[in-house]
Amino acid sequence: MRIDILTILPGLLEGPFSESILKRAVARGFVEIVVHNIRDYAQNKHKQVDDYAFGGGAGMVMSVEPIHLLTEKLKKERRYDEIIFLTPDGEKYTQKLANYFSTLGNIIILCGHYKGVDQRIRDHLITREISIGDYVLTGGELAAAIIVDSVVRLLPGVLTDETSALTDSFQDNLLSPPVYTRPATYKGWKVPEILLSGNAAEIEKWRFEKSLERTKKIRPDMISD
Ligand code: ADE
């Protein structure tokens, strides 16, 4: 998979992909992540990438040209399955979308800023508009890092235990059950007996019940009946 990220703040995306699982996924060739500075495609002397909104109003708007030039260049090089714009007024990001994105070959992620992007970018270049939640960030970069993280960990071979992504919260519409590790007793705090029993079927049943209990309590909206 290849992910191209378009941003005016490439420095914000240096950290997230250079640690742990994402770093390893890149090093092993499961994913190629390329961060592009939109400013490099500005055609004016001051490398300006935004301008005042027509009709007035507070806040700057990201201009069409540099983003268009950059996306056209990339599209000449390869075919993209989705060109995603990150914006608080987009479709809500979910595990279902992460699963879908992880099946794609090449995607572009455009990080929004200021008062947004010129609507013509959304109308003519973007195939999908995504929000990571009902709150407003200063820009789309941190949202891009979240999306890349949630997608890359799903690529076959990225997680060392192949089954672990399948048992994540949300994959079966339930939150995960509690987990414990050694010691079995810490200052009188005990691990549930059932987990020490070695009875796989009973443990599975207990985990399912706990998942259901947690989901009913914390996210009743996830249980549709
Ligand atoms: N940019 C600003 N806020 C955002 C959000 N909630 N999701 C995606 N991109 C954003």
Image (cartoon, rainbow, N blue to C red):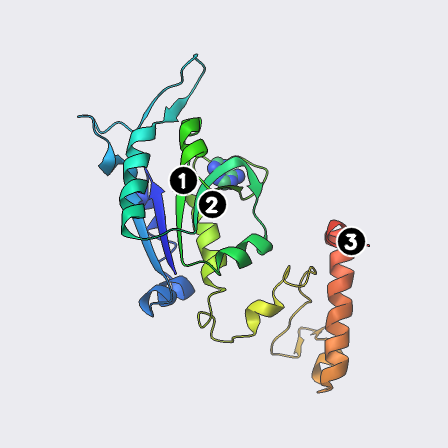
At x 36%, y 47%, the residue is 5
- Which residue extends farthest right? 225
Q: CA distance from mark 3 to mark 1?
A: 34 Å
> Where's residue 218, x and y in %?
73, 53
Q: Secondary structure at mark 3?
A: loop
Q: Are marks 3 and 1 in contact (CB under 8 Å)?
A: no
Q: Is mark 1 within 8 Å of ligand 1?
A: yes
Q: Are marks 3 and 2 in contact (CB under 8 Å)?
A: no
For the residue pair 80 and 63, the one nearer the viewer reads as 80
Amino acid type assigned to the residue bearing label 1 in the image: Cys
Badge 2 density bin: few <14, some 14–19, many ≥20, Cα 10 Å = many
Q: Are marks 1 and 2 in contact (CB under 8 Å)?
A: yes
Q: Looking at the picture, does residue 46 appear above or below residue 172?
A: above
Instruction: Determine which of the numbered discs, if any, sits on residue 94 in the image.
Output: none
At x 56%, y 71%, the residue is 164
User: Nearer the viewer's eye, disc 3 or disc 2?
Assistant: 3
Give the residue pinned by disc 2: 143
- Give the mark, 3 or 1, whose residue is nearer the N terminus: 1
Instruction: Determine which of the numbered discs, if any, sits on residue 224 in the image.
Output: 3
Amino acid type assigned to the residue bearing label 3 in the image: Ser
Q: CA distance from mark 3 to mark 2?
A: 28 Å
Amino acid type assigned to the residue bearing label 2 in the image: Ala
